[in-house]
């Protein structure tokens, strides 16, 4: 493959140096085994003079060494020349503009991809530097401003994906970059000088591309870079954390969160046990806050996978995750609440008894509020948690704490919920508790009746007080009306109101 490069480029050089004296049609192609003109003897650079064709040949040993060096230099020059040609960037806003040049560049990029795949000798540092320079020239660019309509992002983002017109070249450049990163002929120690932190940072910025094809290519390339260049791993983790911080607390929009989480799902699975403190902080400060944005549904499967990987590595983190979910639990977004309940079930499946007992009180208070949700899907999804065998076993072993929290919500559903499906599932859950511990259920029922009577009495006192206020207002009296059971005295009517002094 390299010799074919050399033959083609050498012939182009000979043709250009002839000053166009030929007829314009190329002669027969040279056989690939023929050496280039610079492979015959020593290079002209060594003595500064033009070699004569009738010079006597050198000794066999000297000729072999000089020929090998000239072949390496020729191979390197041919490769770098092609890579430099591919650094030219064309405007794809006009499809008909520079069409021959665009096609020529694509064909040259494809030949480079084939070349690096079939190469047998390692790439030199000059060749590696040229490749990285070409990647930067083609890939690192400023995205056009996003024009958004009045509709929300979650409604339009998935319906009409944007496809970059320059993908005609970008696709081959990404393929070349992937071959470059995965090739065993690219020395990681040498390439580390050029695939450095600025290069990786600009590569991560490309994850905000609107083109899903580009994000998919970047996902694979970032994973390969993380695996090959071990010195870049801490920087990549920190840079991705910063992307998450900006997304959650500043911009509230980023196109590549799902792809970045998919990469880190495999990265987290490779963390060694016990987990480092840095990795735990990444879970608490970077992953858990990703539940806050409204667009969490776009990347929730990848986020859930990352979090469950952490819990499988260290089960004690289950309590931390559950408290984080409760912290960012939605209040007015029912669809988001349904997604949270699904993720909560996956987390509880990996939770042991000790961690479950630490957070079961606030957890089931939140579940109880979901049971009484007027949105029937939220209530139904919360009731389906009892179908999980692992969770049901933990609930049965801690029923003395959980049932008094849950029972009022179950009783209210049986009395007042409007959806028949929710009513049927609620009756089934009550039946489970009755079979589990009937005495405890009856005790909770009696407590609920007492609480309801107290609540009814309080409502009656409040109603009577408001009636008294209305009658006093109708008679024109302005004396303060205090409930009969109040434990604090009324202020005298002649008391002066004194404004606080400002010091």
Image: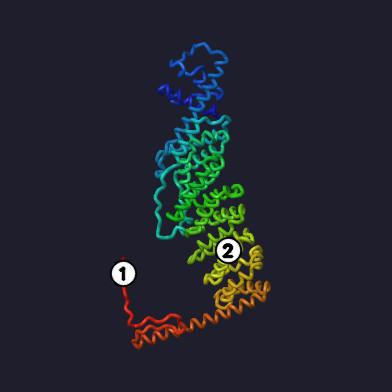
Which residue is more in the foreground, 32 or 48? Answer: 48
Q: Where is mark 2, residue-wise?
A: 359
Could you tell whether 359 is left or right of 467 in the image?
Answer: right
Instruction: Give the mark nearest the N terminus, 2 or 1.
Output: 2
Outermost residue toward the front? 503
**Residue 501's disc number:** 1
Q: Number of callouts in the render?
A: 2
**Where is the C terminus found, in terms of image quarters?**
bottom left
Q: Tell me where residue 499 sits by quadrant.
A: bottom left
Q: CA distance from mark 2 to mark 1?
A: 47 Å
**Where is the N terminus found, in terms of image quarters?**
top right
Residue 308: image location, x then y, percent: 59, 55
Q: Residue at x 55, y 24 (%)?
A: 31
Disc 2 is placed on an element classified as helix
Q: Residue at x 58, y 30 (%)?
A: 120
Residue 381: image location, x then y, percent: 58, 66
Outermost residue toward the bottom? 475
Q: Residue at x 53, y 23 (%)?
A: 71
Colour scheme in use: rainbow
Residue 299: image location, x then y, percent: 52, 55
Residue 161: image location, x then y, percent: 47, 52
Which residue is more in the foreground, 86 or 471? Answer: 471
């Amino acid at each position: 493959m390299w010799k074919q490069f050399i033959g083609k480029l050498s012939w182009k050089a000979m043709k250009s140096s002839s000053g166009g004296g030929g007829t314009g049609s190329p002669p027969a192609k040279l056989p690939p085994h023929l050496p280039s003109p610079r492979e015959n003897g020593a290079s002209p650079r060594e003595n500064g003079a033009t070699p004569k064709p009738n010079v006597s040949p050198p000794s066999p040993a000297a000729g072999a060494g000089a020929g090998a060096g000239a072949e390496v230099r020729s191979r390197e020059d041919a490769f770098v020349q092609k890579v430099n040609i591919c650094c030219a960037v064309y405007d794809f806003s006009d499809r008909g503009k520079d069409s021959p040049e665009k096609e020529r560049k694509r064909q040259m990029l494809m030949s480079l991809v084939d070349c690096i795949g079939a190469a047998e000798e390692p790439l030199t540092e000059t060749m590696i530097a040229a490749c990285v320079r070409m990647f930067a020239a083609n890939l690192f660019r400023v995205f056009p401003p996003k024009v958004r309509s009045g509709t929300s992002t979650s409604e339009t983002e998935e319906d009409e994906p944007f496809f970059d017109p320059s993908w005609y070249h970008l696709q081959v450049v990404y393929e070349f970059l992937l071959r470059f990163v995965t090739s065993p002929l690219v020395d990681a120690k040498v390439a580390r000088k050029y695939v450095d932190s600025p290069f990786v940072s600009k590569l991560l910025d490309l994850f905000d591309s609107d083109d899903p094809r580009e994000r998919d290519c970047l996902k694979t390339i970032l994973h390969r870079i993380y695996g090959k260049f071990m010195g870049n791993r801490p920087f990549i983790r920190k840079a991705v954390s910063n992307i998450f911080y900006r997304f959650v607390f500043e911009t509230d929009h980023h196109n590549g969160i799902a792809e970045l989480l998919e990469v880190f799902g495999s990265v987290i699975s490779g963390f060694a046990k016990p987990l480092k403190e840095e990795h735990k902080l990444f879970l608490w400060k970077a992953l858990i806050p990703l539940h806050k944005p409204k667009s969490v549904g776009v990347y929730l499967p990848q986020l859930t996978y990352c979090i469950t990987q952490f819990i499988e590595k260290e089960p004690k983190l289950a309590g931390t995750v559950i408290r984080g979910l409760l912290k960012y639990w939605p209040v007015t977004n029912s669809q988001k609440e349904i997604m949270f309940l699904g993720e909560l079930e996956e987390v509880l499946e990996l939770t042991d008894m000790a961690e479950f007992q630490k957070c079961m009180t606030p957890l089931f208070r939140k579940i109880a509020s979901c049971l009484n949700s007027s949105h029937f899907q939220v209530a139904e999804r919360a009731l389906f948690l009892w179908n999980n065998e692992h969770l049901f076993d933990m609930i049965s072993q801690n029923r003395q704490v959980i049932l008094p929290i849950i029972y009022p919500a179950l009783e209210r559903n049986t009395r007042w919920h409007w959806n028949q499906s929710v009513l049927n599932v609620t009756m089934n859950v009550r039946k489970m508790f009755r079979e589990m511990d009937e005495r405890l259920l009856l005790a909770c029922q009696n407590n609920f009746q007492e609480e309801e009577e107290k609540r009814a009495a309080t409502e009656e006192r409040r109603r009577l007080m408001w009636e008294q206020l209305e009658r006093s207002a109708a008679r024109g009296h302005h004396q303060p009306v205090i409930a009969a059971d109040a434990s604090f005295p009324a202020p005298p009517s002649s008391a002066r109101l004194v404004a606080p002094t400002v010091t």
